[in-house]
Image (cartoon, rainbow, N blue to C red):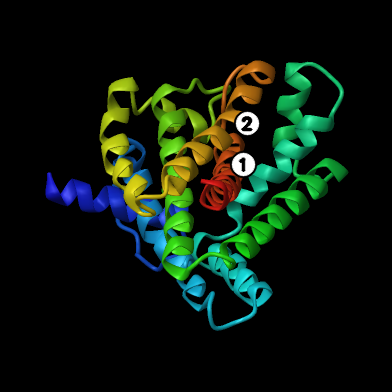
Amino acid sequence: MIGGGIAAVRGALGFLTRLPVGHRDGDWAAFRSSPATFPVVGYVAGALAAVPLLATEALPAATVALGYLLAVYAVLGIHHLDGVADLGDALVVHGDRERRREVLKDTTTGVGALLAVALVVAALALGGLSLAGLPPRRAIGVAVVAEVGTKLGMAAMACFGTASDEGMGRQFTTASDPLSFVAPTLIALPTGALTWPNPAATVALGGALAGIGLPWYWATRHLGGINGDIFGAANEIGRVAGVHLGVIAWTLL
């Protein structure tokens, strides 16, 4: 049991991050059938990516924001941005469901892809700039919660989502069921206390889940379900939404 849990976490870290955790046979299978590992990765990756935020009181806000942006992609990689790019092209294409699915699989980069990636990266950079205006402990709290929240959203997609085709999305949706969502939820809930007594952390968690819900809803309606690209796009959009809403909550509440 313990060995299986370690394999699942190792598989999750290997797939969702750039951390050098190595790979062994069975890691991928263990990961895709263990949605609880998604928020675990959120804690680890979120904490590492938030390290530049320790300097919010020592360095210019723009420098800290750049450090946060670079840290996010250094730790988590850029492969999920491919999902954002494919979603961007699918959003702007004219046609029916099958045509949108074809665009998602097309390796050609269109204007929609370029705009979508630019908007997501710019939004995260601006979120980092907002985080740089918070006290270090609070900034790190919001950043970690946003990452845990977006990973919890990915777990929700795996547990409740329906795959649109036979690709990677189906490997997750067929390996979990709604009951499997209990464990990742319990793992993620403690993040709500990271900015206590201010509710910013709770808002960031909910915001990340809401951000995940946007591409999920669109894909369900226009593609007939989710796939690997939607998982990747949702991961990026959820993070951005969590960071921005968490900072807004800290500022206003």
Report if residue 184 is visible in the image.
yes
Q: Is residue 52 or residue 219 the one in the foreground?
A: 52
At a point 31% along the width and 38% down the height, the residue shown is: 184
Spot occupied by residue 52 in the image (x, y as percentages of width and height): 51, 74
The kind of residue tagged 2 is Pro
Quick check: 137 left or right of 219? left
Q: Do the residues labelled 1 and 2 touch (CB within 8 Å)?
A: yes
State the image coordinates of residue 99 (x, y, percent, origin top left): 78, 22
Q: Which mark is residue 233?
A: 1
Give the side of residue 198 with respect to residue 226, left or right.
Answer: left
Q: Provide the secondary structure element on which disc 2 rests.
A: helix
Q: Can residue 25 be seen in this view?
A: no
Q: Residue at x 76, y 32 (%)?
A: 90
Amino acid at dot 1 = Ala
Quarter of the image holding residue 167?
top right
Residue 81's x, y, as percent? 65, 50
Above or below for 79 versus 112: below
Looking at the image, residue 125 sits to the left or right of residue 92; the answer is left
**In the image shown, does 28 or 93 lie closer to the viewer?**
93
- Disc number at residue 215? 2
* Above-or-below relation of 152 to 15: above
Residue at (21% x, 47% y) in the render: 5
Where 182 falls versus 123 (above or below)?
above
Q: Residue at point 62% right, 30% down?
A: 214
Which is nearer the N-term, disc 1 or disc 2?
Answer: 2
Q: Where is residue 127 in the image (x, y as percent from the top left)?
A: 63, 57
Q: Residue 150 carries which label?
A: none
Between 231 and 59, the residue placed more toward the observer is: 59
Image quarter hosting the N terminus = top left
